[in-house]
Amino acid sequence: MSFNFEFFYQTFFTAFRGLPVTLKLTAFSLLISLPLGFLFAVIRLKERSKVKNLVSVYISFVRGTPIVVQILVIYSLIPSIMASIFKGLDIKMNVFDINPMLYAYIVFSLNTVALLSEVFRSALATVEKGQLEAAQAAGLTTFQGYRRIVIPQAMVAALPNICTVTTNLIKSTSLAFLMTVKDITAVAKVEAAYGYNYIEAYIVIWIIYIIICSLVEILFKLVEKRMKVYKRALVS
């Protein structure tokens, strides 16, 4: 079976129709996950408590299960259970009419929160505890100490790992087609289905994700250069 260059060329540009969906999934998941991941990291650095234990169990569960399983549970199992409950309670609501993008936001946000929590936890450990105590002794509140002293330094240490989590998130969104979300992968697979040109379609998907992830890495490197001032403070 010969390689169809015409299909490859056409599908390459057609697949970009799914780019806004991929970017929305990535941006929304990061927007939710960054503050929650940092909060969970702070909780995990505190003394033992029930909240810390719950957070630890949640992170272990997310990191220990494939994202495909998480998608099947949240997109298929939970709606089926809810539908049965609503039917028993005579609640007239069709949970299967919910926009699949909502499920995609939930899946990728929950997954990214767990990953970023580990990133922030290791980054916060690089900042000496005495700096926060010194900030509090100088009259700053705990929140101000974190915002002005701890977070800028921790972000410098966390930035490379945040870049890795972001690129992995972008690649993970390619599984959104399992939830009938029309992202890059879904658009390319639909185009391939007409003539069974799946090899060409998969190569298109591969190239597009390489381009996106490469641009993200370049962006993070530029941000890292801008934060050199905090890196000096971290080293000293």
Image: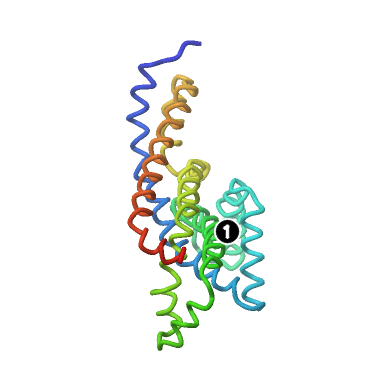
Instruction: Determine the residue located farthest toward the front in the rendered image.
Output: 236
> Alpha-carbon neighbours of circle 1 within 10 Å: few (<14), some, or many (≥20)?
some
Q: Which residue is mark 1?
A: 83
Circle count:
1
189 relative to 69 in the view: left or right: left
Residue 199 vs 48, above or below: the answer is above
- Of the pair 178 and 55, the residue shown nearer to us: 55
- Of the pair 168 and 83, the residue shown nearer to us: 168
Residue 129 vs 29, above or below: the answer is below
12 relative to 109 in the view: left or right: left
What residue is at 66 percent from the left and 60 percent from the top?
60
Q: Disc 1 residue type? A: Ala
226 relative to 44 in the view: left or right: left
What residue is at 63 percent from the left and 48 percent from the top?
66
In the picture, the quarter occupied by the C terminus is bottom left
Residue 174 is situated, as x and y percent measured from the top left of the image, at 48, 41
Residue 9 vs 60, above or below: the answer is above
Residue 74 is situated, as x and y percent measured from the top left of the image, at 57, 54
